[in-house]
Image: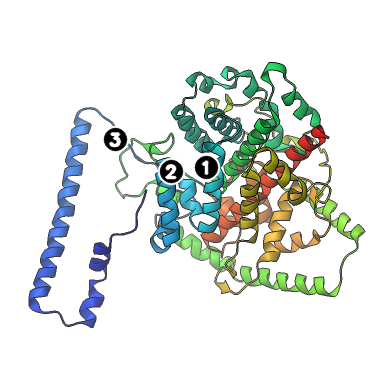
Amino acid sequence: MRHAVAPAENVENHSFTVTDLFKICTHCERLGKKVRERREGGRNRKKKKEKTAKRQLSDLGIRIPRPLGNGPSKFIPEKEILQISKVDSRTQSIFEDAFAALGRLDNISLVMGFHPQYLESFLRTQHYLLQMDGPLPLHYRHYIGIMAAARHQCSYLVNLHVNDFLQVGGDPKWLNGLFEAPQKLQQLGELNKILAHRPWLLTKEHIEGLLKAEEHSWSLAELIHAVVLLTHYHSLASFTFGCGITPEIHCDGGHTFRPPSLSQYCVCDIANGNGHANHHDDLLGNQDMCGEVEVLMERMKQLQECRDDEEASQEEMATRFEREKTESMLVVTSEDEESGPPRDISRHFEDPSYGYKDFSRRGEQVPTFRAQDYSWEDHGFSLVNRLYPDVGQMLDEKFHMVYNLTYNTMATHKDVDTSMLRRAIWNYIHCMFGIRYDDYDYGEINQLLDRSFKIYIKTIVCSPEKTTKRMYESFWRQFQHSEKVHVNLLLMEARMQAELLYALRAITRYMT
């Protein structure tokens, strides 16, 4: 865990302001010089000891790892992420509580620290799902997390939960592949696959197959717990790839044994924005995108005026939704050729060729799911809360938290109402899943979300493993990294709610 800079160092770093403001006597000046020299000497001795220890380990033939990248994200400069906990006492407190509860502070939490209100809600929900009383045993919970993250080839989350699975007494044999897990968990594979890629195909027959599997059957409460875990980790994989989260140094992929380059910068430094190579590109990018924020704000203003002047008919609203849904199918998530998941990931799930892209290629149509027929507020929330007490409430708070989260800013502009933009992002994601809100004009989406942004959204939500740094940089070039993290939080929660709606609707249909 990284802590804020010690007060003593702050005094040293800002001593010039003190000497400018106050007359310091010669004795104090000499004393201050001695303190600084002693401190510098201590640092040099510490560095010398570290070098000696490393040399001794090297002489013994022990390879010494070093971080593969700088910081928690490949997309966001480390200094911006670490600055958050230094200036925000609430974030620092949340980090400390998380570390005390888990014995670690993962990079996902560090990046979410841009938005402490949301982070607090997220960690509380995740802690309850994984560690508190519930229908499923602890090792089942972590194994389901592995299964869900593996569907999107998210090795970061898979490795995290492999360690947790073993710590709570999980059988190491299960990690050889899904075929080694109990039949009960194997039967969850089909639900995992459909929810991750094409949730609209889920039926009450899928639910019946799980609940009436004789000695391997699931109870309703267990199934609700499993569904929430699956949707949680599918969507968290989206956030992980969307923010370029890097593995911690002790995890697979988080370290290298190669010596550092002579220039003190390696490729991963530059990719992470910690070198000097990106600065010129950023300046050019800002010049190219000059006025981007102002154009977006002007469109929001015009749309609001149109809303006030006239309201489209229900038939026209339905037509605009179907048009937007069809267009979203044509948005290409990646220009790269398909590549199968690595063996160590694919063993945790079946049918690796099954995905969102296959569906769009075949030209199938996503059926329309009318939100007023089955909504989270009126139907899903009460079902979850009844079968898995308190979780429905926690999820509801988390959804509302991210949907309503705002600082009333857009890039450098203040006192801006961003509700129209947030709703467009949320509803576009649900539109891709076929979910329609009768009271929303889907014509607004094309006005507020440009093509590069739509490509990013669809990639993160449908095929997050294909996300690239170029995609992250290609939208909202003038916006802050914290605003892009907020976008990723919206994408994550909107996706989770969409998956949940399809799963809970199928369960409700089975029950009735």
Q: Quadrant of the C terminus?
A: top right
Please, what is the three-letter code of the amino acid marked with disc 1?
A: His
Which quadrant of the view contains residue 90?
A: bottom left
Q: Nearer the viewer, residue 110 or 123?
A: 123
What sort of colour scheme is used for the picture?
rainbow
Report which residue position mark 3 lands on.
Answer: 64
Return the x and y of residue 342 as percentages of the image width and height.
55, 28
State the mark number for residue 127. 1
**What kind of residue is marked 3?**
Ile
Give coordinates of residue 251: x percent, y percent.
42, 36
Q: Tell me the SS state at disc 3.
A: loop
Among numbered discs 1 and 3, the one appearing first in the sequence: 3
* Label 2 sits on residue: 101
Q: Element type at marker 2? A: helix
Query: Label 2, label 3: how many angstroms apart (C-alpha)?
Result: 29 Å
Q: What amino acid is labelled 2 in the image?
A: Ala
Residue 215 lies, in percent from the top left, at: 68, 16
Q: Nearer the viewer, mark 2 or mark 3?
A: 2
Q: Counting other residues with Cα less than 10 Å from the Cα at mark 3, is it few (<14), some (14-19), or many (20 or more)?
A: some
In front: label 1 or label 3: 1
